[in-house]
Structures are given as C-alpha cells and as structure tokens.
Amino acid sequence: MKKETIHLRHKIVNDTYYYIYKNLEHQITLDELAKLNKVSKYHYHRIIKEETSFTLFEIITSIRLQKAANLLLTNNHSTISEIASLCGYMSHSSFIKAFKQRFKHTPTAWRKGAFKSYSKQLLEKFPTSKDFSNIEPQIKVCKAIKCTYIRHKGYDKKIKNTWEKLYAIAYENNITNFKQIALHHDNPTITPLEDCSYVAAISIDKDYKNLNILEIPESLNAVFELKGVYGDVLNFIRYVYHYWLPNSGYETSSIPCYTIYEKNHFTTGFGDFNLKLYLPIKIAF
C-alpha cells in the first residue's frame, strides 16, 4: 500500500472520530461521513472496518454510551431521557436496552453506584491502594496543539512499539523538542482495555505532507499532575471520572481526555512516569 494511501486512510479514521464527538447529539449517517471524506460509501465503510476493526455503527454506539455513562454521573439534574437525547438517542427504550447490553446495568442502577463495581472489574489486573483524593486540578484554558500521531488499539505494553515508531518518525523528519501526548478516545475505566483506542502523538509546529496530522482543539481543562508506575494512569482516570468529576460542578466536553508526559514510562522500560492529565470540561447545568 502506498504511503499516500495509508496517510489518507488514517486521516479518514481520525476525522471520523472527531466528527462523531462534535455531533454526538445528532443523527450521524454513513452517507454524510462518506461525503465528508470524499469517498464512496462502500470504500468508506471498508476503510473504517479495516483500520479500526469496528463498523461505523459500533464506533458511534460506543462513543454515545461512554458519553451517557459519564453524564449519568455528572448531570445530576438531568433526567435519563434528557441524557439519552444529548447522546443522540431518539427513543428512551432503545437507550435503556443499549446501555444495559453494554454495561450490564440499567442507567438508573449505574447512577446509583453500579459504575464502581463495573470499572473495578475492568481494572482488576491493576490493583492499587493509592489514594488520589489529595490531587487537586488546575482549571484553565489550554491552547490548541497540532500533532502527528499513530493510533494503537488496546491499552497494553505493546504501546511501547507505537511510541518507538513515533520517535523514528520524529527523527526522520527532524522534529525536535516535541511534547509527548496520549489521547484516550475511549474511557479505559468503562471500556474493555483490549478495545480501547489509544493515540500516541507528538506536537509539531508546522504541517508535514507525509505525516498524519490532528489538532487537539483549544478547551477548558481540569489539569492534574500525576507520578506513578504502569497501571496507575488507569486507576487515576477512574478516580477522576467516577469520584472527582461527579462532585466538581463540571461535566466532560466532547473532546477526549489526554495526557502529556514529562517522563514516558512506555519508552523507559516501564519504570515510573511523570505526566499531566488534561480533562476537557464545561460547567454542569
């Protein structure tokens, strides 16, 4: 496959994810996304399936239900029907059915505390006794960051290989003094780790025709500083979403959370890390 073709396929996947995040409350069709990416419906469907292992419907459903799972905890004054509508569900009953099928609990049970046991089970490989409650975030507006990136399916130690490839890309294109950024398109505390979409990225200050480019948009963020070892990031994200966020007066925006590494444990033999977690937020009403 030609480099230009690989680049185009990656761009289509990235543009698809961001379009879905930005238009989650609306009905999203294969027709409009194929038209947006200037390819036929058949070609578009095949690219999405081959690059992500999921159909467009599965991707949209996953993102909608993750958003709903978070809103059920943060939007205390919204009804379940209102949250379903915010996440693009026209039918209350279809939302209940889809939510229970995905999370094994009804939205009502989830809201009442079922999320704790569900996320704990997903992270059982990473037990921790750490107390994160003393880590307070700084709330601030963060400027847009332009990046080149490689997408990795799953949250596992093979992420190391993805970072090594990204370092090679930086070297070949003379990209220096870059920020190391990880985007979590899927919330790993409510999504099986093998299905999580992890994006390894480095910041760039100009466009490169031969590279995949994305831009993390400017947003209001809760910025947390964290030091730890492999697995601590997952437990900390769980704490942020399931304990800090519901009591914060904020809710998540449509932009995925991301981390910026000061010390990246995926490239240093899985030792300790030092990072900042950026959680895009907005005022909860």
Image (cartoon, grey):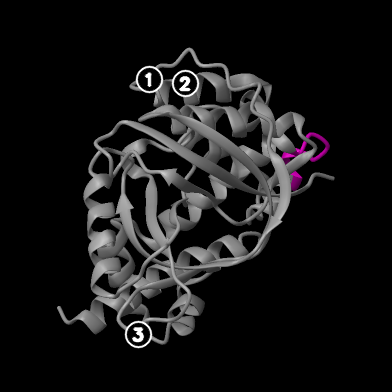
The residue where tag 2 is placed is 120
Quick check: marks 3 and 2 in contact, CB under 8 Å?
Answer: no
Q: Position of residue 168 (x, y in %)?
A: 22, 63
Instruction: Please tell me which residue is depicted at 28% across the width and 61% down the height of the picture.
Output: 166
Label ID, residue 124: 1
Left or right of residue 149, residue 279 in this image = right
Q: Is residue 227 magenta?
A: no
- Write the start and end of the magenta stretch as one range: 75-82
Q: Disc 3 on helix, strand or loop?
A: loop
Tell me the quarter of the image containing the C terminus.
Answer: top right
Q: Position of residue 53 (x, y in %)?
A: 28, 56
Instruction: Please tell me which residue is depicted at 23% across the width and 54% down the height of the picture.
Output: 164
Give the prevailing secondary structure in the magenta stretch: loop
Quick check: marks 2 and 1 in contact, CB under 8 Å?
Answer: yes
Left or right of residue 260, residue 27 in this image = right
Give me the C-alpha separation between circle 3 and circle 2. 43 Å
Please indicate, yes or no, whether residue 270 appears anywhere in the rendered image.
yes
Label ID, residue 216: none
Picture layout, residue 272 above or below residue 170: above
Give me the C-alpha separation between circle 2 and circle 1. 6 Å
Please indicate, yes or no, whether residue 27 appears anywhere in the rendered image.
no
Name the one closer to the observer, 40 or 189. Answer: 189
Q: How many numbered discs sit on the rendered protein?
A: 3
Q: Amino acid at mark 1?
A: Glu
Q: Amino acid at mark 3?
A: Lys
Name the one closer to the observer, 202 or 159. Answer: 202
Give the mark, 3 or 2, whose residue is nearer the N terminus: 2
Tell me the quarter of the image containing the N terminus.
Answer: bottom left
The residue where tag 3 is placed is 209
Left or right of residue 172, residue 120 in this image = right
Name the one closer to the observer, 45 or 1. Answer: 1
Instruction: Please tell me which residue is depicted at 31% across the width and 31% down the height of the picture.
Output: 271
